[in-house]
Structure formats: structure tokens, C-alpha cells
Image (tube, rainbow, N blue to C red):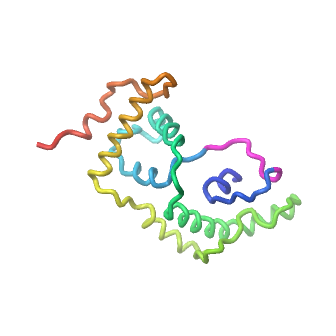
Amino acid sequence: MSDFARVFLGLRDLAPTETRERWSNRSIPLELAILLRNAPPGMFWSNMHDNKTFYPLKKLILQWELAPTDIAARSREILQAYAHATFESDNQQLIRQLGWKTEYFVPPTEGGADPSGAGLAELNDLWRSTASDAERQILFAALHQLLATASSSPDRLETPARGSGRLSGYLRPRS
């Protein structure tokens, strides 16, 4: 939960002694996740458990310093308001029972986001890609090429064997 609160909700003022992290799984930027939702089946994974291409892609992308976006900030605000409205009463009970020295686990939002959960519908719009099919195909081809290049570099990332043909069926010249 501390990882979720710090990384996804952006709550940086959590006391380290109260929220010691034993594990952290930093995610890819939200905008890339939105784009990858539209990737052709089999391009980056064959099923929900196939991460042999996704993990090297994630490792590569997490090296980039990308500026925060309004979409990510608004998504965090909506989810924080929802989490506060949905879970904070139980959190308060735990805080009292365990004697934790904190006022909230998920503080209320300052931006006036709808705490009823109705604001979650806005996420459908926020998480819809505005890229065209052509832009997505170019991005997917570029990501595939980056993975191939990274796999042949000295500090090689673990990727599927080159020449696996995963991309060949997706990016053919139009006749």
C-alpha cells in the first residue's frame, strides 16, 4: 500500500518509518500503458502471463526521464478521492487499533474530486488513446526496434530471440 500511495497517488510526505517498503514494482508511464492497451494481440505478449517481452520493454522505458502529465495527475486525484471515500473509514479503524501515528492512510483530495465513485467514469475518457492507428503502429515498431537494439548491446536486456517475427504480421506495406 505504501508503494501504491507513493508511486501512483504521488503522496511523497509519508513517514518512512511508518511505511517501510519491503517491495516495489514501479510501473510504466500511464500514457504508454494507455497506448499499449491497443497493441495488436501477440505483439508484446501472447497472454496475461507472458512477460518475456514486456519486462525488458519496461526496464528500457523506466530509464527515460519523462515529465509528469495532466492525465496522470488527474487520474491520481480521481483514484485518491475514490480510495479515500471507499477505504478510509476502515483505515481509520486500523490506525486506532494499531496505534499508528498518522492521521490518514489515504488523505482526502484538495481538488474537490467526486468522492462518490461517480468520478471513476471520467477515467474512461482519460484513459482513451488519442493517437491514430498510424501513430500507434509507428510507436509499436519503434519500441520493437529499441528492444532488438537493446538485446544486442553489451548490457543486454533479456528479450525474445531476434527474428521471432512478432512484428512481421502487423507492419506490412500497404499495396
Instruction: Spot the residue most to the top.
Output: 154
Out of 150 and 132, give the one closest to the viewer.
150
The residue depicted at 49 percent of the width and 37 percent of the height is 60
Residue 24 image position (x, y, % from top left): 66, 43
The residue depicted at 17 percent of the width and 40 percent of the height is 173
Question: Which span of residues is magenta-colored?
Answer: 17-25
The residue depicted at 33 percent of the width and 27 percent of the height is 164
Residue 146 image position (x, y, % from top left): 40, 35
Residue 88 image position (x, y, % from top left): 72, 67
In terms of image quadrants, where is residue 165? top left
In the rendered structure, does residue 24 fall within the stretch colored magenta?
A: yes
Q: Report the label total.
A: 0
What secondary structure predominates along the stretch shown in magenta?
loop
62 versus 128 height, above or below: above
| Left or right, 149 with reference to 60 | left
131 versus 93 height, above or below: above
| Left or right, 103 with reference to 133 | right
73 versus 161 height, above or below: below
